[in-house]
Amino acid sequence: LTIDVLIGVDHYYDFVTGRMKRNATGSIALETLLGWITCGKPHSSPSDEARVLLTKVEEPTNAVLQKFWEIEAMGITPEDDVAPEDTRLMERFEKSLSFNGERYQVGLLWSEGQPDLLVNVKQAMRRLTMVERRLAQSDKDSCDYSSTMRRYLVNGWAEPATESGPTKRTWYLPHHAVYKGEGEERKCRVVFDGSACYGETSLNSQLEAGPPIQMDLLRTLLRFRRFRVGLQADIENMYLQVQIREEDRDETQEVCKYRLTRVCFGLTCSPFLAVSTVRVHARRHQATAPRAAAEVLCNMYVDDLATSCESPAEARTLTTQLEELMASGGFHRISGPARSRLH
């Protein structure tokens, strides 16, 4: 039998006309827009013979066992060997990290030890003009963007800059808005373009990304499903809670007026600096807040924490411990859907 056309069940009744012919054996002929088709019970002679075809793909036994033990050993196996370059970058980060009693301060991870930047103020001004033209097309977008930028000044995330920064250490960062959500839930986030090139260089090209330090996402999700009560939270504005040290602030100037004082979105090293700072803070408080510190070290992915507890009471206690732990490092807001449901 040659098959000319295959029609899905969802389109079947678009083709049949309603005319039908039936014979004594149970076979049926149906008229369609494409011609007659046959269906129903086929006429066949009884047979005592049966044919069965079984196909199966088997993984090698050692591969199956390896996968099994990898899942069973999650959280207890030693970490992979760290490359010498990663160790060097981690040492540089820890050397630049300091705590002033209220919040942490870090230095940028320069590729060659010291920056060699050009004066890109003209390029930054052109980018700013383009942003202003786009914002002029929407009063709401313009208002949201201005409000977000004012928050940088009110919260101390940026500060007035000097007339001119030090030579080869000053870079003007173009920025633009990213909008997320709809209606009243719509939020505006400022993203700084550290990859903007000028004179065949950019700020990001002179920064190291840092070694990978994120927790394995599969392990985090498996632990999240372990107990009856799920707990999810995130650190609000995590990057902006970490200060940039004084000598590195001129590399993150906004055009002519202000320079950033905090780690910002858009730099190559920002994820590493922010996440590493949170992990260092947790390790430093393992003795005073063992449960909360362990949750941060094992169950936090970037700025999101996902874990589970045996009961709502245990979840409330852990939430309080996490808030106290993070507040002691300058991360004053822990937000998430679990917080409101537990009270």
Image (tube, rainbow, N blue to C red):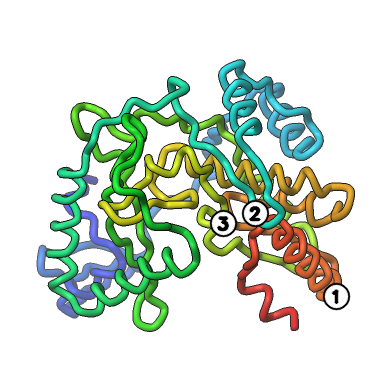
Quarter residue 233 falls in: bottom right
Q: In this rendering, which labeled residue sits more in front, label 1 or label 2?
A: 2
Q: Which residue is mark 3?
A: 241
Point out which mark residue 103 bears: 2
Seen from the viewer's position, the closer of residues 74 and 320 is 320
Check the image and report above or below for 268 versus 287.
above
Q: Are marks 2 and 3 in contact (CB under 8 Å)?
A: yes
Residue 120 x, y percent position in the rendering: 22, 39
- Which amino acid type is shown beneath numbered disc 2? Arg
Indicate left or right for 37 with 306 as reference. left
Q: Between disc 1 and disc 3, whose residue precedes?
A: 3
For disc 3, the neighbor class at 10 Å (few under 14, some 14 to 19, many from 20) is many
Cα distance in 3D space between marks 1 and 2: 30 Å
What residue did someone put label 1 on? 313
Q: Which mark is residue 281?
A: none
Split into 4 quadrants, where in the image is the C terminus? Answer: bottom right
> In the image, what residue type sits under mark 1?
Ala
Measured in 3D between alpha carbons, the distance from the residue under mark 2 to the one under mark 3, in whole angstroms, is 7 Å
Residue 105 at what x, y percent from top left? 59, 46
Q: Is residue 19 above or below residue 262?
A: below
Q: Secondary structure at mark 3?
A: helix
